[in-house]
Image (spheres, helix red, strand yellow):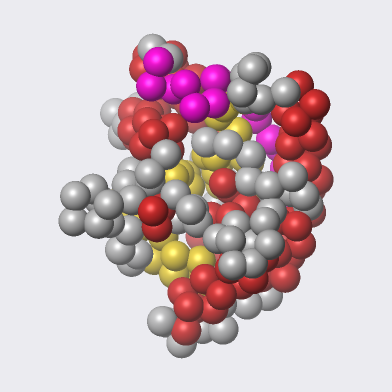
Amino acid sequence: MNERFLGRCLVIAPHPDDEVLGCGGTMARAAAVGCEVHVAVVTRGQAPAFSEDLINTVRAEARAAHAHLGVLETHWLDLPAAQLAETPHARLNAALADLVRKVRPDTLLIPFVGDMHLDHQLIFLSSLVASRPHQAEYPRRILAYETVSETNWNAPYVTAGFVPNVFIGIEETLERKLEAAALFRSQVRPFPHERSLETLRALAVVRGTAMHLAAAEAFVLIRDVM
């Protein structure tokens, strides 16, 4: 695959680190060949569930991880984390629509609709609303990524299952992805937890060898207009 085919990329992350877990290797690969890579972190932790110290720590970790991957700009939307179901859906739609108009991405990378976390599901839906093709400009390509501990913990046969049909090789950027994930010191967990570096490496190898690649990230293609 020619990375430049992705064009300008916008990665929608429900929470800080989802983007690195799901497509950090793809982000690094695109940035390495000169593609603009933007990340939108949709939510912000709210007291009393999240302390201000933890919120600031995670944001600093995200900035460091994004810089390591070559992200051009991080956009903080600051909607309430784990409270999107109680937030007017029009507010989420408008926030993402404004961002899509501002960034004008060619490729949109979004969480998968079948993820267990309701924030992920709602952001998937609002991302599609923000990207409707009746606009003068809209993302021509939309890919849904998988997030360990969310995508794989849904209820197969009851909710949508993640069956990837796009595989992006990350042999050259897997280590950079793992280094970026390690920068989320407050979030990474020891093996065999799913959010461990060993798990991320194993998933990349499994996704890669399915396509005779050393390592890959897997996606579900939602739309591709040629």
In the picture provided, is 178 more to the left or to the right than 194? right
| Relative horizontal placement of residue 54, taking residue 25 as reference (left or right) | right
Q: Residue at x 38, y 46 (%)?
A: 115
Magenta segment: 69-86
Q: Is residue 34 visible?
A: no
Q: Does residue 198 show up magenta in the picture?
A: no
* Up/down of 46 relative to 14, above or below: above
Q: Residue at x 42, y 82 (%)?
A: 211
Question: What is the quadrant of the C terminus in the image?
Answer: bottom left
Instruction: Look at the image and tell me whether residue 212 can be seen.
Output: yes
Query: Residue 169, relative to residue 58: is it above or below?
Result: below
In the foreground, 185 or 110: 185
Report x, y in % for residue 68. Answer: 79, 54
Residue 221 position in % (x across, y down): 34, 56
Q: Position of residue 130 (x, y in %)?
A: 39, 28
- Residue at 48 percent of width and 53 percent of height: 149
- The total number of labels drawn is 0
Residue under the point 32% across and 58% down: 162
Q: Is residue 79 magenta?
A: yes
In the displayed orientation, state which residue is furthest to the bottom: 212
In the visual, does 62 lie left or right of 49?
A: right
| Foreground residue among 214 and 4 | 214
Name the residue furthest left. 157
Residue 34 picture location, percent across and down = 70, 56
